[in-house]
Each structure stands twice: as structure tokens, then as C-alpha cells.
Image (spheres, grey):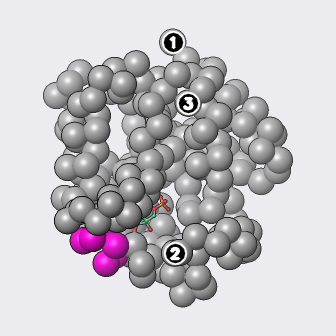
Amino acid sequence: MRMVFIGPPGAGKGTQAERLIKKYNMAHLSTGDMLRAARDAKTPVGLKAEEYMSSGALVPDEIIVSIIEERLGQSDCDGGYLLDGFPRTIAQAEALDEMLAKKGTPLDIVLELQVPEEELFTRLAGRGRADDNPDTIRNRLVAYRNQTAPLLEYYGKTGLLKSVNGLGTIDEIFDRVVEEMEKVNK
Ligand code: AMP
């Protein structure tokens, strides 16, 4: 399965992704994790990305697209992957479409995890990551609303988009996601 996971920060994508990759044997491609690793390793890309991440802004498309392009070329992606936190802008989605069209490996599903904003703020504020302070959280939610939410319409038009209620227990949400996955699993 080639899957895109969309949802605001704090929606629980990471938690659900951990389970989904096991069930469907997908590589887990989290751009946030990749950027944090690059930042901690103090690579040039990591240090550049940190300038944006620390304020809750999105890292420029060119940086992210080249990271993903390289990652998708690795052999563990051949059996399927879950893109967690990418694409986050229309330009990234277009770049992804182009890459996948060239390879002849289209996406199977785009899954949206829906959680109301009030709930997100509470969850993020309780998490304790460096970019989980109130100002940064606010910026990340605004970035989602303005830059990422338009992807719902973009993928809605392709028929790939499935939306799932992200409120409830981890098990309940997982079951809802799996129900959608099973409809397209091949
Ligand atoms: P995440 O762990 O997915 O919440 O990502 C943490 C931070 O990394 C975000 O707030 C952005 O600054 C940056 N980031 C992660 N993925 C992307 C992306 N696809 N495009 C731009 N910035 C990203």
C-alpha cells in the first residue's frame, strides 16, 4: 500500500502510523522525524530546517521534496510506504504526483484523521516536544489550516481521500482507519 496520512499536528498520525506500518508492511516515512534526525546530527539541511521548525513554520518545499525523492528511491519503499507529514502543501503534492507518475506507482489511499482544533491544542501542549510551546503550536495549526488543509480538496478530486474521525481510543481510531484501508487493500 502506498498511503498518505493527512491530519493536523496532534491528530495522532504518528501513533496510528506505528501500528499501520506493521499491519500492512509499509515503510514509515515521517518527514518530521527525518528533519529532527537531520537537526540533531547538525547536517546543513538539518540546521536550515531548524530555522523553520523552531517557529512552527513549514520548511521550504524544495528541501522537503528532495528529501522525499531520495527516500522513495530506497528499496524498503518498494513494498509500500506510509507518508506521515508529507505532502503538506499543494506544491509538494504536485511534486509527489510527478515523481510517482514517472515511476508508475500511484498512491492507493490518502487518509485524513479529523480532530477539532480545541482538542489539538490540549494534546500538543501536553506532549513536551521542543516545538510544542503555545506560540509554536499556534503557528503549526495556522500552517495546517492555510497550507495543508487545501490538500483535502486536491485529493478529494482524485477519489483517493478517505476521512476518519480521530476522536476516541487508539484502538477505536485504528479500527476506523483499517476499515478504510481494507476497502482499497490489494
Ligand atoms: P511533524 O513532526 O510532522 O509535526 O513536523 C515537525 C515540523 O517539521 C513541522 O512543524 C515543519 O516545520 C517541519 N515539516 C515536517 N514535514 C514537513 C513538510 N512536509 N513540509 C514542510 N515542513 C515540514
Magenta-colored stretch includes residue 51: yes
Which badge, 1 or 3, is on the more N-terminal residue?
3
Please say if the residues under marks 1 and 3 sit with CB atoms less than 8 Å apart. no
**Residue position marked by numbered label 2 in the rendering:** 131
The quadrant where residue 129 appears? bottom right
Frontmost residue, 135 versus 76: 76
Q: Secondary structure at mark 1?
A: loop
Q: Residue at x 49, y 69 (%)?
A: 145
Q: What amino acid type is highlighted by mark number 3?
A: Ile
**Residue position marked by numbered label 1 in the rendering:** 186
Q: Secondary structure at mark 3?
A: helix
Please say if the residues under marks 2 and 1 sit with CB atoms less than 8 Å apart. no
The quadrant where residue 172 appears? top right
Q: Residue at x 20, y 24 (%)?
A: 103
* Mark 2 neighbour density, 10 Å: few (under 14) some (14–19) many (20 or more): some
**Residue position marked by numbered label 3 in the rendering:** 21
- Residue at disc 2, CB closer than 8 Å to ligand 1: yes
Q: Residue at x 83, y 47 (%)?
A: 169
Percent x, y for residue 44? 20, 65
Q: Which residues are magenta?
A: 47-52
Percent x, y for residue 11? 64, 57
In the visual, does 171 lie left or right of 39? right
Foreground: disc 1 or disc 3:
3
Frontmost residue, 78 versus 186: 78
Percent x, y for residue 163? 61, 44
Q: Residue at x 48, y 67 (%)?
A: 144
* Mark 3 neighbour density, 10 Å: few (under 14) some (14–19) many (20 or more): some
Look at the image and tell me whether residue 78 can be seen: yes
